[in-house]
Amino acid sequence: VDCSQIGKSEFRYHQVGSCTVRAYLTRSGSLNAGNQMFDFESAPISFTLMNEPDYDELIARAIRNNEAQHRPGFRQSLIEWANLQRKRPDGDILKRLEIAEPSRRNNTAVQRDLLLLVGVRTAVVSHFSFRQAIRETWASKSALPEGVKVIFLGCRPFATALEDEVDKLTEEAKLRAIWEAIELEKRVYRDLMTDELDCEDSYFRLADKTKQFLHFAAPRYPTAKFVMVADDDLYLRLDKISARLQHQSKRYYAGHVRAIEDATKQRPIRDPESRNVLSRGQYSLNELPPYALGANFFLSMDCVEFVAKNSGRLRDLGGMDDISVALWMLIMQVHPKPFNGLKYLNSGTCRDDLASLSDLTESAIRVIHANIQQQRRFCHDFQRNVWLRQDIGAPAEGQPRLLSFDRENVYFDFTIPTPTESWAGQLMITVSTKTRAGVKVSFFPANETFHHTFLRKVCVQVQLNFPSAITTCAGIRNRIRTQLLELYVKLAANTSVDPLQLKQWKVAFEQT
């Protein structure tokens, strides 16, 4: 290996195999043939040189070994997850749907004691596996510190339609299935914002997404002291972050500020081929103000309220949300402060003392969480090319289509056997919409109560199979009761039905 002077470093490797390297430092001009003394001599470092195919296989094998540690299906797509839940619903999913309408009092209690609201920007259709990784790791109930709430920011969702798709009905059915899968995710987890934010789910509208989130957060979570905006490919140590925010106050804007931490001036990118281009029409100055990088930054609630109040008048820079926020804060004369410990794997490495590491795969998020749970180092088993996301900035293929469909009404059809002496109140309800086939739910009085068990079961099945329908659990209960009363009146008018048997039938549905 030959090494030139600092600033002109060049390494030349001569052969594949095991190597050892040692660094020697000496003052310029002090080393000659008769002088073998050095001012510094490093410890030897061993490494292996590999050809490209062998290296690629090594990394692929390491990725497979990492992924083998996780639960099956951890990289499921949104559609795969939704289809599986309809066929074999997970027990936890059913429990979540049973409590899908929490009381307002409970929601208010959570918001009143909020220290930090974390808004995680996510691509609604394509990044379901990242949201699941976050829900099951640093944002899980067991890991989330008290006073911290995490929600996902999606905007109005888009999906890509293939240009060679000739069957428009098939295309519409696929797009509707994606939309209904999104609706199911929203019903199950209640943490994904789509139409609640008045924005489009696109990288080139990222600044508008951030603005709309702040506009949403200010009135919805008015007692939160701080708001954090983050990407969905990172691991957050919210325990460390919360502890540090306890000592901050108003007029607070912080994150990874390169202009301060690296003592470098940032200049706008003028290259039209770059997705981060800023034209002179957008930004005419030759130097950017100091700003906190967009992958994660913090604002105190007074700063959030300023953006929310003036959202209609504040201009943004398209996909440059971090620079946009800095310009908005300059109006308040609030300047960014460094928040140490926020790093990016795409331009750096892992450190054990980090509060955040970005540019991760779903697997890496889970590996880091396992490290923390098992009291290992944050960076235990770190391999850069195994943990680093490879598709950062990759454009989506196909033609984007806004996912917007009409919500449908739910219909209930009742099937009961002809009342006889042996009839014990059995009932079957078929639930359907105009575009979806019916789902049958049976009632067996010997095993369950009608009001407390069966109606709840119907509600769960409606949410699971028709998540985009216009309905609530309370509405379902009222409609079924009304239709059953109408059916009872109809049967009562039938003189061929034994009144005693009819009374027995009615009692079965009035029990609690």
Image: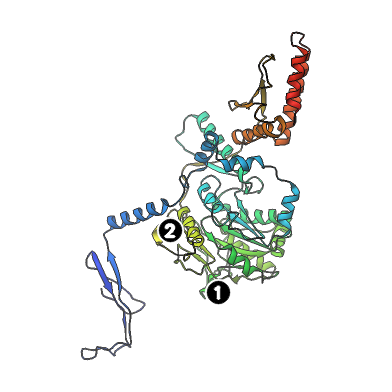
- Given contact means CB atoms under 8 Å apart, are the residues at marks 2 and 1 in contact? no
- Secondary structure beneath label 2: helix
Q: Quadrant of residue 282?
A: bottom right
Residue at horizontal 64 percent and vertical 68 percent from the top: 245
In the image, which disc is placed on residue 451? none
Furthest residue in direction top, as rendered? 496
Percent coordinates x, y for residue 424 in the rendering: 68, 21
Location of the C terminus by quadrant is: top right
Which one is closest to the eye, mark 2 or mark 1? Answer: 2
Tell me the amino acid under the disc marked 2: Trp
Report the front residue among 422 and 215.
422
Mark 2 / mark 1, whichever is N-terminal: 1
Percent coordinates x, y for residue 170 in the rendering: 50, 30
Q: Quadrant of residue 114?
A: bottom right
Residue at horizontal 66 percent and vertical 66 percent from the top: 329
Q: How is the image coloured?
A: rainbow
Percent coordinates x, y for residue 147 in the rendering: 67, 60
Residue at horizontal 46 percent and vertical 63 percent from the top: 345
In the image, which disc is placed on residue 387? 2
- Residue 26 horizontal side relative to residue 287, left or right: left
Classed neighbour count for the residue bearing mark 2: other residues with Cα under 10 Å, few (<14), some (14–19), many (≥20) = many
